[in-house]
Amino acid sequence: MFEQRYRFHFEAAHQLGVNVDTKDHPYAHVHGHSFEVFLILRGKELGPKGWLTDFGRVRKTAEEIHDLLDHRYLNDIEGLEVPTLENIAKFIFDKASASLEKLAAVEVNRPSLGEQVRYEA
């Protein structure tokens, strides 16, 4: 089994007030994070060019997603009205899988907090 991993970063703000009980909870306020994303592709066989997927294609997909999320208020993006790490990972997977048929998983990290979520279809 072959596995490719492509990493990119984005910066964004969000709030998770619907997830907490009090207005004093830090998540109830708008705040920002640096997000690290891994697109993970898998396959048993290499193509005729000797690679699983052209990294140029993976990079183009990552750049499109980056441009959609970077320096944005995530709650305003359709499909991310409740932008938990879990929902962000699934959102990115759904967007990327449209052009990357060997996409197996997406990991989203907030390295400064030591938090990570992995989504696999």
Image (cartoon, grey):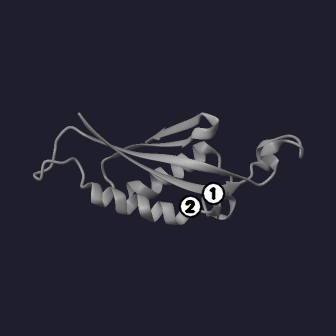
Residue lying at 56% horizontally and 61% vertically, measured from the top left: 69
The percent coordinates of residue 56 (x first, y second) are 28, 60
The residue carrying pointer 1 sits among few (fewer than 14), some (14 to 19) or many (20 or more) residues within 10 Å by Cα, namely: some
Asked if residue 80 can be seen in this view, the reply is no
Of residues 121 and 30, the one nearer the viewer is: 30
Residue lying at 54% horizontally and 37% vertically, measured from the top left: 117
The correct choice, above or below, for 30 with respect to 78 in the image is above
Marker disc for residue 26: none
- Which quadrant of the figure contains the C terminus? top left
14 relative position to 60: left or right: right
The percent coordinates of residue 64 (x first, y second) are 44, 65
Query: What is the total number of numbered labels drawn onto the structure image?
Result: 2
Marker disc for residue 12: 1
Query: Looking at the picture, which amino acid does disc 1 mark?
Result: Ala
Of label 2 and label 1, which has the lower sequence position?
1
The correct choice, above or below, for 99 with respect to 27 in the image is below
Distance (Cα) linking label 2 and label 1:
7 Å
Residue lying at 89% horizontally and 46% vertically, measured from the top left: 23
Say which residue label 2 marks. Answer: 69
The percent coordinates of residue 67 (x first, y second) are 50, 66
Of residues 108 and 81, the one nearer the viewer is: 108
9 relative position to 85: left or right: left
The residue lying furthest to the front in this view is: 112
Asked if residue 82 can be seen in this view, the reply is yes
